[in-house]
Image: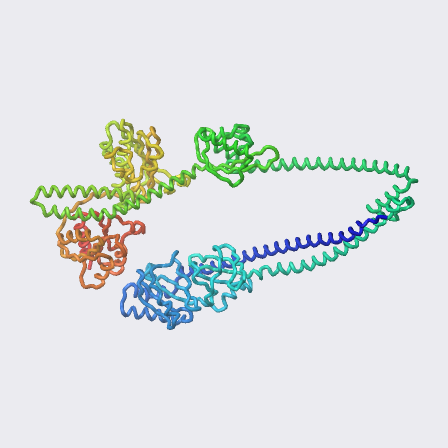
Amino acid sequence: MHVFKRPQSIRRKLPLFITGLLFTVVTAFSWLAYSQLASALLATAGLRVIAVSQRLATAFAESDIRLRRDGTPLSRDSSLTRVLLRPGESRFTAAQKVLDAERARNKKQVVVLELYDRRGARVLLSEASGSRSAALAGRAPMIGLFAGQSLVGPLLASGDTIFTETRLPILGAADDTLGYLREFTSVSSSDQSGQLIRSLIGSQAVLLVGNADGSVWTDLTTQLEGPRGAGAPGTVKETTGADGTRWIGAVTAVPHIPWLVWVALPRTAVIAQAREFLYRIGVIAIALIVLGTLAATILSARMVAPLVDVTHAAEGIAAGDYSRRVAVARDDEIGRLATTFNVMASGIQLATANLEHQRVELELQQVELETSNHELQQTLLLATKAREAAEHARIRSTAVLAASLDCIITIDQRGFVVEFNPAAERTFGYTAAETIGKSLHELIIPPSHRAAHQRGIAHAMASGEAPVLGIRMEMPAMRADGSEFPVELAITRVPVDGPPLYTGFLRDLSKHKALEAQLQQSQKMDAVGRLAGGVAHDFNNILTVILSYTELLLADSNGNGSLRADIGHVRTAAERAAALTRQLLAFSRKQVMHPTVLDMNVVVGELHAMLGRVIREDVLLETKLGGGIWPVCVDRSQLEQVLMNLAVNARDAMPDGGSLLIETANVELDAAYVAHHTGAMPGNHVALSVTDTGTGMDAATCERIFEPFFTTKAPGKGTGLGLSTVYGIVKQSGGSIWVYSEPGHGTSFKVYFPRHDGSVDEALPAAKEPIAAQQEATVLLVEDDDAVRAATRRILERCGYSVVEAPEAEKALDLLRADEIHFDVVLTDAVMPGMSGLELAELLAAERPDLPLVLVSGYTEDAINRGGPLAPNAVFLEKPFTVHALSRTIADVLSRVERQPS
């Protein structure tokens, strides 16, 4: 008899299978829970170290702000201000005592105190004894303030002690900076830093403060090695220390101070809670596996034993014993199996078994019918929910399409429009109804790009390559009126069943491109202006020498007519060169301006007759002056030059005649106008418009017309400086200028000057005085250019003055402070290497307010940039000057001093 072994095999394998399944599930769940908890703890720790480092950095920055705002009592000490204003032995002694007393009061922290004047020269030093103070006091003298005007400098290390350098301005009575106080202070703070960080984030956190370049790091008690690979400021970075400890830290830059703050927590401390959780869940998992194994063993025994009985009964029937029955009474699948077996084995119950079989079939059919009805109801319910979801999705999609500021267009695989949102309607000029079902490339793609567009779509459809969201490109597009404009395009494939759909997101780049072009043009004009201004400034020095010597030669050549004629030609050429430099200075906005408050209508009206003579008879000149024109503050001669240059330019643009219209009006430039015109300022302006009916210009020419030496005229017909001069005058006067032109439709220049609140000045007649006899006086001549200095000395000596030369401002100060020569006036160049003439004037205003000073320059860029008036004792003389102008200026200055009461 054959005995089956499978029941015994199932009894062994079933517990093993259930145990393995439980182990796999519990292990995976435990590791997933541990990973998520550890990630959450690390993320929380990162947020904590960032917040604490930012809080500490803010505290350091606020301390620096308070120091800059309030200063210290020492920064306003009268002994220090007196020694900086007027040095003297007794004042040095008093100031030294103040510094020593201040260091003695803070001897545990303050190591070195130094006093510097405004030029960076050290005046006094107070230092503590010992190697640390010596190491710090040997540092280089102060050259300037820290970057960003911070008063606190980088950390300094001397041995294990950390110092910081602080520079405080010494303020005068008018809050002007007289000098600086340099202080080296120990930053050691015992365990205060540890207490602070523990109170903020925990006992295991660490705090390091270091320089921005990573040269010095400290925990505010001693010097330490900085964190390795700490990452960029404001980011959390996991680092490993020299001892192998892994840290979760963040670096924050201290605003206005060249320091970095690093706060970190040990990684083991952060994830300690996760490890404890893993241990607990592991114990629970082991218990679950043991219980599961026991339950599987019991279940296997209960399931396999009845199967063994059935097997034995089957073996008996196979041997011919039809009386065998299975004695199993269970209400489950095994019991049903035993019952069926007994029925099959009983021949007597055959008819009953057939009837039972039919009854079972009817029950099964009824169950199937009920199941079918239930499935049909479920299908109908799902269909209803699907329709509701589709309707909600359609409503949301419609709202998104309507609210979007970008154009959203959906097409099918043939390129026909399926959706066209309101933004697309506004941008392209079509309605959605006009586009649905039509080819997109024929609607918005310019004809010159349609072939390439169709090839791209055909390739995508044939290859199955669908664009994905995030791929962006620029391309030309076309509006309903046929005008082209640039757009930015992003395409994505819509995830739908059936044929594919594609959605394009388009953004109009017209305004963006226009602003980019205006910005590039402005930057180019500024760069060329700086170059032209520098060339004109140096050229003015040369012209000063030429004009000075030609006037001296003319004065000495009374009896030689041919020589005087030759010299006159040289002077005429030099004057023409001077006029050219004035045009360069006008373009570069560095010429000397003499603005007055005037009425634009008056200037245009008085210049009307002159303009009529400049233009030809075949050009009709018209003026349209607005009523109630606001006053403007500009240089009248420069304004006249603007009008003259624009009129001449318009005349040349109308070779066959035409009309020239000059208009004035009050306008207000709003934010929308300023946003599309780089360099314009919002507010009330007076507009000056010059419009002609000439040949006009294309866009490329309009972009370059204000460049110096650019001209569309034939060689020898123009210098290319007319419109660049107009541009410079307008910009230096605080205004703006724009050109509007098309080929064949004329040109219109629009100039906007800001409204001035003052009243119109009355013009005074100019008086030209000859060289007058001079009284005896000594002039201190300060000029860095040797040729200009020699020519100026010749003129002054010819006028009868005694002259002492100084090639630089520092030498002039030494001569004045030595008090060996009595000087009646100082004549100095305004722009020089090192200390400029403007700085010399400020010093003399404080030290020698009674000594008059004459500033000479081709332009006063420094004075203009400061936006303030000249020193009270100073007058200005423009280069290139004449002998008459120089002698008259010196005489006026000396006569003004004589008229002052003694």
> Image quadrant for the C terminus?
bottom left
Q: Is residue 560 left or right of residue 403?
A: left
Q: Which of 664/212 is in front?
A: 212
Q: Is residue 307 left or right of residue 589?
A: right
* Residue 31 rendering spot, x and y as whole percentages: 64, 55
Q: Is residue 369 left or right of residue 381?
A: right
Count of labels in the image: 0
Q: Residue at x 34, y 59 (%)?
A: 144
* Residue 56 rendering spot, x and y as whole percentages: 48, 60
Q: Residue at x 21, y 52 (%)?
A: 785
Q: How is the image coloured?
A: rainbow
* Residue 152 rendering spot, x and y as whole percentages: 40, 61
Q: Residue furthest bottom?
A: 129
Q: Is residue 741 left or right of residue 294?
A: left
Q: Residue at x 91, y 40 (%)?
A: 347
The answer to whether any part of residue 602 appears in the image is: no
Quick check: 232 above or below 526? below
Q: Which of 29/477 is in front?
A: 29
Q: Residue furthest left?
A: 559
Q: Residue furthest front?
A: 1
The answer to whether any part of residue 879 appears in the image is: yes
Quick check: 433 above or below 375? above
* Residue 169 rendering spot, x and y as whole percentages: 36, 61
Q: Which of 8/539 is in front?
A: 8
Residue 647 sits in quarter: top left
Quick check: 678 above or below 624? below
Residue 818 sits in quarter: bottom left
Residue 71 sits in quarter: bottom left
Q: Which of 348/822 is in front?
A: 348
Quick check: 400 above or below 830? above
